[in-house]
Structure formats: C-alpha cells, structure tokens
C-alpha cells in the first residue's frame, strides 16, 4: 500500500506538540511530561507519516540522554524502521551527533549496512548514508566508515554512484585548511581516479564502438567515465578556477601550492578517458594553477590533450587553450620556444589545434614557425 505523505490530523497534531516541546515554557510546565510521552510514542506509531514527523524531533525527545545513549536510541529506531523516508530522517538525526559520538554513530551505520537492502546511493536515503560515512571517514577516521569509503574509492568503477557522491560531499575539505584532513581527501580522490584510469585502459578493445560488451563490462566502463569526470569537476571547483573565470575570483596564489602539487597527478589520471567534458575540467584547472609552475602546467596540458582529436575539435577547447599559448609566448617565451620539454609540449598543442583548423592556432604556427624546426 502506498504511503501518502500529505498532512493528516494525527501527524499535524504531533507536529504541533513538537513545536510546544521546543518551547522551554511548555517543556518545563506541568504539561511537559505528557507532551514528551506522546511525541516519544509517536516514534513507534503504526503510521509511517506520524513516525516521520516524530523522527524529526527524536533528538529533542532524547535531549536528557548523553550523546552515546542518544545515538544508541536513534540506532535502535533506525534498525527497527522499514520505511526509507523515515530511515532518511533518522540518519540525518544521527549525522547531527557526529561531533559528539562518532564511534557510536559508526557502529550504528555498520549494523545498518549489514542488512540485505543496502541503500541505493542515488536515493535520498543513500545520499544521507554516504554523506554521513564520508564525514566519519575524513574527519573522524572511524573504522567502519574508513574501510567502506576506501573500498568504494579503490573500486570506484564498480561503486560509481557511491564514489561519485563521496567526491562531491568531501570537496569542501580539498581547499587549504587542516592539512591532514586535506591529505586524506586527496588520497581518496587518488584512489578513485587510479581505479577509473586502470579500468578504462585494462582492455582497450572494449573501448571500440563495435565492441560487444557484457552488462557488467558496460557498467564498469560507464562507472570509470563517471568517476573521472566527477573527480576532475570537484578539483576544478575546489581550486577556485570557476570563481576566477565567472565571478572575478582571485588568481591562483601561493596558498594553493600544496593543492596544486596534490591535484596535478590526479587530474592527469582523469584525462586518460579522452572524454572532452572531463578533459576540459582538467585543462581549465591546470591552466588556472599554471602561475604556480608554468612548465609543469604546460607539459601536463599537452599530455592531457593527446591528439586523439575529440577534444581539440571542440570550439570550447580552442577557446581555452589557444589564448593560453598566446599568453606563454608573450610572458614566458623562453619556456615556449627554447626549453626542451616546454617547447615540445607547446609545439604539440599548437600543432593539435592548428590541425583541427583553429584560425588563431594557424596564425601562431605561421608567426612562430621556429617552434616546428
């Protein structure tokens, strides 16, 4: 039977009592114990809608308990609950205890994960579950969360939905801050990018348009592509490149030196799929970080655009790269024309975009023909 999540008399009544329970004057009045008892009973009501409304105030009902006691009580409710919407609310309440009782929350989620119906990471319940585990693994390093998140990232093409959301909800930790936390997130992204690149390159014949793939093979390749794109996207936004391009944000400064050192190897792995959308995130991030080490960025961009043609043929690619080449000729001419590795990378990029028919690249090629000698 379908659950109707519209307002009804009983759940509205419980909601009203919760508002009263939130007010010290009512909570401490002679009516307080009765209000508390009714809301507590609502957590076990036969109606899913009533339980959902009451679950939102579960921490308030358990306010007199210590954090570990509260988590164990919330865990009991979660493990007894069969409705996914109510489960989602209860996990969100557990997430509010992460700072005070992380070990207990970790234990509850481990028991929840042992059930046969593992939550779909694309559902609201799955996203609440994954985001809570991500925080526990990165910020608290609790055992179950750490093992689970690392397994997902090391085998990201198989757990693409989970790994994608981990990357998305941990992006805030990538920016300069707590160095150990930043390092842990970069380790997770490295694991994900490496696993995606390894799966993408494991059987090159499977990448042909004519390849006959099993459902598992197709799913893994799609997962690898999704992870490469997601990781590149998170690094692009975390770097500040988007803010710089679209909202007059600051250029890359010395505060991003460590970020760049950690990000460049991961970005290189993300580019191996050759998918233009992913490569563009890679190139834009490298270009933004280039002032920190122009030679590193030039060679890395050259490697990312490997001449297979798909990305270089896109106008958005030439709009991003060719002006950067002009900038190098204007401000870093020795690197572009005379440094052995830098000149080779510059020549490769210029030749790639000139071959793709970009007019500005052709003009540069003729103007600085000595780069082809």
Image (tube, helix red, strand yellow):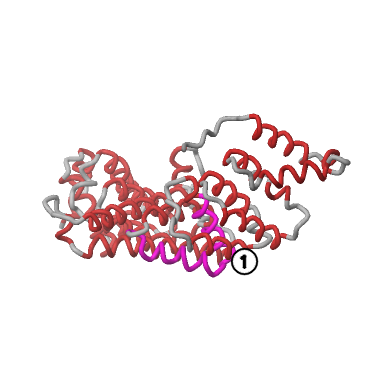
Q: Is residue 116 left or right of residue 202?
A: right
Q: Residue at x 45, y 53 (%)?
A: 119
Q: Residue at x 63, y 58 (%)?
A: 98
Between residue 347 and residue 288, name the one nearer to us: 288
Q: Is residue 132 magenta?
A: yes
Span of residues in magenta: 128-157
Please, what is the dominant secondary structure of the magenta stretch? Answer: helix
Between residue 32 and residue 234, name the one nearer to us: 32
Q: Residue at x 66, y 57 (%)?
A: 73
Residue 135 vertical placement versus 44 (above, below):
below
Q: Is residue 13 magenta?
A: no
Q: Quadrant of residue 152?
A: bottom left
Question: Residue 169, how many percent across, how many down?
Answer: 50, 52
Q: Is residue 86 left or right of residue 155?
A: right
Residue linked to disc 1? 103
Image quarter of the C terminus: bottom left
Q: Residue at x 48, y 48 (%)?
A: 240
Between residue 307 and residue 79, name the one nearer to us: 79
Q: Is residue 291 left or right of residue 321?
A: right
Question: Residue 89, how many percent across, how many down?
Answer: 58, 46
């Amino acid at each position: 039977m379908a659950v109707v999540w519209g307002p009804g008399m009983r759940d509205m009544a419980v909601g009203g009592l919760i508002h009263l329970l939130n007010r010290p004057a009512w909570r401490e009045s002679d009516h307080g114990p009765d209000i508390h008892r009714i809301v507590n009973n609502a957590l076990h009501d036969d109606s899913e809608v009533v339980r959902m409304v009451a679950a939102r105030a579960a921490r308030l009902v358990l306010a007199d308990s210590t954090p570990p006691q509260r988590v164990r009580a919330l865990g009991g409710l979660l493990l007894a609950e069969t409705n996914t919407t109510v489960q989602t609310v209860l996990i969100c309440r557990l997430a509010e205890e992460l700072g005070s009782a992380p070990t207990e929350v970790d234990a509850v989620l481990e028991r929840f994960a042992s059930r046969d119906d593992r939550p779909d990471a694309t559902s609201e319940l799955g996203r609440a579950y994954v985001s809570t585990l991500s925080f526990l693994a990165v910020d608290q390093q609790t055992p179950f969360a750490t093992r689970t998140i690392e397994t997902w990232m090391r085998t990201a093409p198989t757990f693409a939905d989970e790994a994608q959301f981990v990357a998305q909800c941990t992006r805030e930790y990538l920016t300069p801050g707590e160095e150990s936390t930043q390092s842990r997130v970069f380790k997770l992204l490295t694991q994900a990018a490496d696993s995606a690149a390894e799966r993408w390159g494991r059987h090159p014949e499977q990448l042909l348009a004519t390849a006959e793939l099993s459902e598992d093979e197709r799913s893994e390749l799609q997962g690898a592509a999704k992870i490469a794109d997601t990781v590149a996207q998170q690094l692009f936004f975390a770097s500040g490149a988007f803010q710089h391009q679209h909202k007059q944000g600051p250029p890359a400064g010395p505060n991003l030196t460590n970020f760049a050192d950690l990000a460049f190897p991961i970005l290189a792995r993300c580019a191996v799929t050759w998918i233009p959308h992913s490569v563009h995130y890679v190139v834009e991030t490298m270009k933004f970080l280039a002032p920190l080490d122009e030679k590193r960025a030039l060679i890395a961009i050259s490697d990312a655009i490997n001449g297979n043609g798909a990305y270089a043929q896109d106008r958005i690619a030439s709009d991003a790269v060719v002006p950067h080449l002009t900038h190098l000729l204007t401000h870093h001419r020795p690197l572009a024309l005379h440094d052995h590795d830098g000149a080779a990378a510059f020549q490769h990029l210029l030749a790639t975009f000139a071959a793709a028919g970009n007019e500005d690249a052709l003009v540069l090629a003729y103007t600085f023909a000595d780069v082809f000698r």
